[in-house]
Amino acid sequence: MAERKKKTFESSLARLEEIVKAMESGDAMLDESLSLYEEGVKLIQFCTKALDDAEQKVKILQKGEEGALVEVDFIKTEGSAQ
């Protein structure tokens, strides 16, 4: 049985770049292009989920109303003037 590599964001992004180059070259036949496209869509979904999960983990410390430090989701403070 072949050893299976763990899929990471970085390896998925690298493979996606390979797919884009192969499709842009125009050398692939229609069936191969469709297969590459489908693989690319799956990789995009994986990468998007990985980024969304990472974003959920990002927290910042901000002073609360009473001056105590409060953990706040990064996305809620993004673009606010504080």
Image (cartoon, helix red, strand yellow):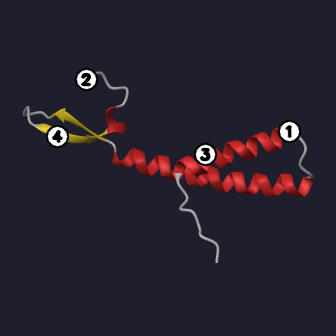
Number of numbered discs = 4
Report the front residue among 50 and 62: 50
Q: Position of residue 34 (x, y in %)?
A: 83, 55
- At a point 89% along the width and 49% down the height, the residue shown is 28
Answer left or right for 2 relative to 7: right
Identified by mark 2, the residue type is: Gln
| Mark number displayed over residue 82 | 2
In what element is the residue under mark 3? helix
In what element is the residue under mark 4? strand
Q: CA distance from mark 3 to mark 4?
A: 35 Å
- At a point 40% along the width and 44% down the height, the residue shown is 55
N-terminal-most mark, 2 or 4: 4
From the viewer's perspective, is the residue at label 2 or at label 3 nearer? 3
Q: CA distance from mark 1 to mark 2?
A: 48 Å
Residue under numbered circle 1? 25
Residue under numbered circle 3? 13
Please tell me whether residue 28 is drawn above or below residue 61 in the rendered image.
below
Answer left or right for 8 relative to 56: right
Report the front residue among 43 and 69: 43
Q: Position of residue 29 (x, y in %)?
A: 92, 52
N-terminal-most mark, 3 or 4: 3
Identified by mark 1, the residue type is: Ser
Quarter placement of the C terminus? top left
Q: CA distance from mark 2 to mark 3?
A: 34 Å
